[in-house]
Structures are given as C-alpha cells and as structure tokens.
C-alpha cells in the first residue's frame, strides 16, 4: 500500500467535488463514504438528499469557528492505494485502514474527542481518499508533524496483517517524481520521459565524465542544455540550474530546474564534494606495469563485493556511488548494439545510488578517476575486455542489492535488482563475439593440451569439474587456461580464485563465467586471432602466480 499526502489546500469543497466527480478520464465509479469522524457525515454518493456543499460545511465547521486562528491551508488530503495484485478490500476494511492512518499521522488520534473532522471517500476498487480539516475541536491546529513516514510505517503493519503485497519503502532520498502535468506534456510532445528526467540523466552523465566542477558545466553546455550558474556576492558558486531549450512555459521562457530538484545528490555542494581533488595514497600510486583505465575500472568493480561485505557503511556507500558513475559513463563508450541496455541499467540503478548513509567519497576517488579516464581513452578493440568489465560490474550490482536489502533499503534494493536484468542482457550481447572466438580456438586445441586442461580443472575445482567439462562453454575455458599458461601464470591458482569470487550455483554456465574471471585475474592480453595456434605451455616449475590485486 502507498499513502500519498498532498500539499495542504484551502478549498474543501473543491477537493470533494473532484472526489465525487467523474475523474479526469471518467475513471471514478460509485463514489461514496466508507467512514467519517462520527459516522454521521452526509454522503452525496449514497444519499440523494445530501449535497457536496453540506459535506463541505460540516467539515469546515471548526475552521469557521477558529476564524483568524485557523491555518490558511486547512485541508489535509491523503490517498491510500493498494497494489494492483492485491485482493479487493471491502468498505469495512478501508474504513479501518483510514482510521489507522489518521491515528498514526496525528490528524485524528484514536479516542481523542477533539480530533480533526475527516471523511474517507472511495471511488475505485483499489484506493480511498481521506480528507480532513486541520482544526481540532479545541480550535487549535492539528498536530501531524512527520505524517508521511508515520503513515508509511502504519501501512507496513497493515500490509502484513491483511496479507497484502509489501511495497518497497523509501527513505526520502529518491528523486522527485514527475507530476501529472509534466507527464502529459511529455506525451503531447511525443516523448516517453519528462524534461526533468531527461535533464537528470544528462546531469548524471556529465558528473560521471567531468574531472572538476568547471568541466562539469562545460560538458553540460556541450550537450545543448541551458545552464545558469548562481554565485554568492563573494563570487563563489552557490548552485546552478538547467533547462532544455525545447521545454518552455506559456510565455516561451525556459523551465529551469535546480540540481537539487532533479535529485538530492545532484545539488552543487554534493557534486563539488564528489569532484573534489583526492588525497593521494600509496594505493593510488602506479605499479611497475602500466594498466589501462579499463583494467583499473574492472579491478575496482571486482573489489566492490568484498568492500561492501567488510567496510564501514560510509565507505561502502561511496563505492556504490562510484559504481553508479561507472554505469552512467558506460553508455558513452559502449558499442551501439547494447548501448540502450546499459543506459536502462544506469537509469534503474540511479535510485540505488543514494541512501541515508553519508558517503565517504575520498575512499573511492581512485576508482572515480579511472571511470573518468575510460571516457577519454579509446575503447578496447578486444571485445573480451568489455565483457570482462560487464561481468565484474554485474557482480558488483548484485552485491549492492544485497547490501541495501540487509539494511532494509527497500527501494534501493529493488532498483539494483532491475539494473541486474538490464546488465545481464548487455553482458550477453557483449560476450557473444569474443566468447565465440575463444570457443573456436578451444576446439582447435591439440589432444595433449585438452588433456592437460582437463586435469587442471579437476585439480583446481574437483567439486565442479565434471559439470564444467560437460558444459558447451568448456572449450572456451580450456583455451583461456592454455592462454594463462602461455603467459606464465599459475592456471590452477587463477582458476580456483576465479571460482571463489562468487557462488556459482545460480549461474547458467559456470564455464563461461570462469572464462572472464580467469582472463581478468590472469591479466591476459587480448585474445589471439582465430587462426593463431596455441603455444605449448611452459614447464610447471616456471609458472609464476598471478598478481594478487584483490583486497584480502
């Protein structure tokens, strides 16, 4: 169930006229009262002698009596809606629910003879509207502070007691929902998303790509977005607002949105905090062998599940934020074939990027720099590089989903789950071509090499070996094991570590998952051409272990 409490109003009769009317699209059927403050309120829906004016008058009685002491906006309006799959509740059920919500919010505490006057109107099977006037019997204002979260908390209990769908709850960190007017305007202009949603995506992408606030504004302007930077009298930046050239009001003026209006983490102070120069640490210093930005991002994504499992919440939230920036950046550099799926994954995961936990962004700045570098670095010609990265990101998003779920961040966990679906589709599309090439090379392995790789699998993963050897993806894994040995890696150690990165019981193909993990952990070069023979592996005693890049 979802409770939606609107802004306070001043026209009781106007609200009732809408509730008892036909609706914007004639969707209201049989409007009638299911409950009221005393059980005797006139019902224009069921009593032919009752009128809307009479009902408004009795609701407004104490407002009139209070005179100047009454609040200007005295109408409290709350709709309570069941989920589409929930059973149809009776009028009696809805009456009980209305009273529980009114009690929880403080509008009409149970047993209080001076509580505000209210009515609950039902004009559809799946929801009711509660209308109250915010003046008590003692002519003092109703005390309904923090009514939204209190209503939500009560609805959680109601869902459990009535056996209804338990709706994911928010924590006030979600982006603003589009208004009905914005949605209708988008439809009129032939768009599927509103101007605010388009701007939010554009701003998020600019944050992911920018290395500082000046570049952030430059990138925004380069997309064609109108940008107005606001300053304090001292000249320091205090904020910004953006608009789309084709989104105007009745006067033809641009409709501006501040960053904080688009989303809580897109305010200028929050963006400035994320883009602030990082303090250099020894972990950030380059190692002996130069690694590309793509490899650095893959390394970072591979470490995220372990960080989320072990680090403090502030550090974990910082890595979830930078994971979001990774998803925001990928559509800029991905091939067109799966750019759309990656964009959908980024949009879905956006809700998972924020929680009440304050992020310690300095802990993730090294990863943030690598993300920004892939936007500027040529995309790798080897398709396996992107497939490996997507596999690592997919695992990181699953870990983020679990992190949110264990902390009861319901909306964030659901957003991560949706992102997983889009990422999986993108991963499958990205993996087809490179996996096919590796697979065909595996089929060309000599019998001696095949026997050796079979023995390696049985040695490294005795419990999974027979399943892996029977899978269609086994030739690709065999080729990757051969590549690891040719590169002088300890193939047994690499394969065991690849399998230890995640549980493999739910994956469709263990061998395919291990191909990408192995190629990443063994730091294999781009795959050889299809016709290039696989060299014989070096002697076992000359094999060197893989570089241990994971945090233990």
Image: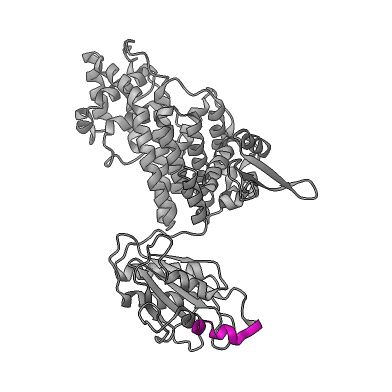
Of residues 116 and 441, which is closer to you in this image?
Answer: 116
Assign the C terminus to one quadrant of the image: top left
66 within the magenta span: yes
Magenta range: 57-68
Residue 60 within the segment the image draws in magenta = yes
Q: Is residue 19 left or right of 446 when viewed as pictured? A: right
**Is residue 119 among the parts visible in the rendering?**
yes
- Where does residue 498 sit, x and y in percent of width and height? 35, 33
**Vertical comparison of 173 with 372: above or below:** below
Identify the image quadrant of the N terminus: bottom left
How many discs mark residues in the rendered view?
A: 0
Residue drawn 33% across and 11% down? Answer: 535
On screen, residue 64 versus residue 389, left or right, reads right
Residue 201 location in percent, x, y? 53, 42
Q: Residue 306 in the image: state x and y as whole percent.
A: 43, 43
Q: Residue furthest front?
A: 49
Which residue is pictured at 39% across the width and 18% down the height?
Answer: 487
Q: Farthest right residue? A: 234
Q: What secondary structure prevails in the magenta region? A: helix
Instruction: Name the residue nearer the viewer: 250 or 341.
Output: 250
Residue at 29% over, 23% down: 476
How far across and down, in percent of the image, does residue 355 sit?
Answer: 51, 54
> From this viewpoint, is residue 521 visible?
no
């Amino acid at each position: 169930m979802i409770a939606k409490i609107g802004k306070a109003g001043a026209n009781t009769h106007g609200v009732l006229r809408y509730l008892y009317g036909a609706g914007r699209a004639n969707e209201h059927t049989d409007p009638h009262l299911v409950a009221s403050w005393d059980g005797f309120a006139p019902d224009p829906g069921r009593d032919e002698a009752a009128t809307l004016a009479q009902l408004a008058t009795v609701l407004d009685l104490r407002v009139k009596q209070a005179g100047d002491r009454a609040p200007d906006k005295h109408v409290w309006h709350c709709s309570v809606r069941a989920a589409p799959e929930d059973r149809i509740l009776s009028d009696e059920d809805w009456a009980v629910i209305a009273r529980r919500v009114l009690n929880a919010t403080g509008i009409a505490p149970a047993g209080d003879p001076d509580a505000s006057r209210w009515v609950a109107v039902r004009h559809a099977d799946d929801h009711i509207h509660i209308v109250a006037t915010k003046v008590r019997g003692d002519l003092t204002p109703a005390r309904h502070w923090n009514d939204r979260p209190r209503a939500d908390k009560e609805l959680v209990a109601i869902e459990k007691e009535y056996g209804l769908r338990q709706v994911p709850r928010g924590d006030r960190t979600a982006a603003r929902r589009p208004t009905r007017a914005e949605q209708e305007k988008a439809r009129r202009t032939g768009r599927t998303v509103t101007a605010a949603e388009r701007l939010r995506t554009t701003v998020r992408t600019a944050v992911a790509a920018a290395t500082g606030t000046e570049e952030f504004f430059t990138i925004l302007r380069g997309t064609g977005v109108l940008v107005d930077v606001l300053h304090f009298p001292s000249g320091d930046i205090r904020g910004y607002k953006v608009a789309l050239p084709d989104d105007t009001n009745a006067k033809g003026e641009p409709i501006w949105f501040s960053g904080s209006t688009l989303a809580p983490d897109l305010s200028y102070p929050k963006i400035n905090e994320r883009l602030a120069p990082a303090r250099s640490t020894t972990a950030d210093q380059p190692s002996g062998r130069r690694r590309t930005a793509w490899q650095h991002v893959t390394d970072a994504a591979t470490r995220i599940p372990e960080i989320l499992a072990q680090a403090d919440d502030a550090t974990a939230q910082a890595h979830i934020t930078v994971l979001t920036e990774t998803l925001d950046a990928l559509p800029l550099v991905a091939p067109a074939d799966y750019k759309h799926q990656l964009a959908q994954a980024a949009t879905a995961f956006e809700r998972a990027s924020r929680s009440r936990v304050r992020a310690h962004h300095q802990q993730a700045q090294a990863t943030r720099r690598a993300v920004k570098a892939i936007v500027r670095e040529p995309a790798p010609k080897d398709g396996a590089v992107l497939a490996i990265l997507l596999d690592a990101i997919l695992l990181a998003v699953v870990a983020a989903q679990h992190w949110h779920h264990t902390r009861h961040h319901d909306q964030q966990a659901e957003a991560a789950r949706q992102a997983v679906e889009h990422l999986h589709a993108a991963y499958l599309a990205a993996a087809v071509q490179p996996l096919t090439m590796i697979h065909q090379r595996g089929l060309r392995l000599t019998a001696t090499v095949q026997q050796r790789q079979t023995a390696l699998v049985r040695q490294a993963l005795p419990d999974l070996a027979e399943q892996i050897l029977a899978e269609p993806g086994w030739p690709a894994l065999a080729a990757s094991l051969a590549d690891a040995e040719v590169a002088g890696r300890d193939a047994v150690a690499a394969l065991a570590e690849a399998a230890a990165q995640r549980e493999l019981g739910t994956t469709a193909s263990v061998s395919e998952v291990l191909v990408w993990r192995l190629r990443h952990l063994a730091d294999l070069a781009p795959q050889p051409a299809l016709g290039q023979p696989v060299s014989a592996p070096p002697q076992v005693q000359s094999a060197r272990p893989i570089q241990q890049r994971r945090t233990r």
